[in-house]
Image (cartoon, grey):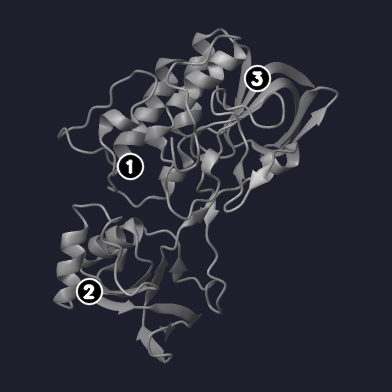
Amino acid sequence: MFSTDVILIGAGPIGIELAVALKRAGLDYLHIEAHQIGHTMTWWPPGTRWFSSSDRISIAGVPLHTLDQGKATREDYLRYLRAIVEQFDLSIRTYEAVTSVRVDDGEFLVHTATRTHPHTYRAHRVILATGGTARPRSLNVPGAELAHVSHYMQDPHLYFRQRVLVVGGKNSAVESALRLHHAGARVSLSYRGAELPAKTIKYWLYPEIAGLIKSRAITPYFSTVPTQITSSAVTLHSNATREDIEVPADFVLLQIGYVADMTLARMAGVDLQEPGESPAFDPKTMETNVKGLYVAGTAIGGTQEKFGVFMENCHVHVGRIVASLTGQEPPREAKSLLPTEV
């Protein structure tokens, strides 16, 4: 059984930034990630750009530069994360899934599994940097499991001249609809709202999607929800007319959001609050109600219906946690920290 002072779980951007800070502080730690570093971004289709500017998503004091000085693409950022890991010579146990975390005799007992072997570790403290988008929301309608239905858009080229129904009306759905349209797909959009939420859609996306909908280049089905998916069509129920609409579709993209996986926090005894299972924690230290167990990054918001916690406003968690681990005063910026006020 391997013992260490700190076990850090999760190797997204905030997890990696924490690893750099832990190493700089001289703390004995072990870093574990169930997939590859930056796993969430591997879902994104090629060429997807961040909504945030590069300075707001850079980590560990290392500038993020892009070829055209514009917003970073998926590829730019994954390359950046790899460079950070190499620059600071970080040791991360990738493709090792944590299967349980529990308190045992005043310490934490952490069980993991690789493709070939289980492992057990002991630690004095644990940090959960597991993110807020572990898996897609389930649609729970007949046909949602069919092969042409997906929560993840692939290379837009694959949809050329295909009939694609995008389900959803927020940023991911809007961006997918636009990219598919420009790649030559025949796009329709189903959204439960009576219109797109203009105030929450990124300012450079909304005018274009609104214009394409107005011209019917993208066919809208507002106030609708899918009730059945077949190999060639989707049945939409209109909340406005109470009628069903049959929409032909070669591909269906479910862009209806993602949920956090708070399983490990629940196992360890963290108080999870509704809505969304957001964990209870001290905003000055990021320590949960379980002594020695910390939470960082978008995991503090659990599953967010209305996003208030983003990666770019979670950098402050790093300093708070390291200060607590090393017995220092919390950084001056520490203040009331709620899922919608970071």
Residue 6: image tag = 3
Residue 218: image tag = 2
**Distance CA(mark 3)–CA(mark 2):** 51 Å
For label 1, the SS is helix
Residue 117: image tag = none
Specify the amino acid type for callout 1.
Arg
What residue is at 37 percent from the left and 59 percent from the top?
153
Q: Looking at the image, is 215 positioned above or below residue 242? A: above
**Which quarter of the figure is the C terminus placed in?**
top left
Side of 160 where 256 appears, left or right: right
Q: Looking at the image, is 139 positioned above or below residue 64? A: below
Residue 74: image tag = 1
Q: Residue furthest right?
A: 105
On the image, the x and y values in percent for residue 184 come to 20, 69
**Which quarter of the figure is the N terminus placed in?**
top right
> Do the residues bearing badges 3 and 2 touch, measured as CB atoms within 8 Å?
no
> Do the residues bearing badges 1 and 3 touch, measured as CB atoms within 8 Å?
no
Q: Residues within 10 Å of mark 3 (few under 14, many from 20)?
A: many
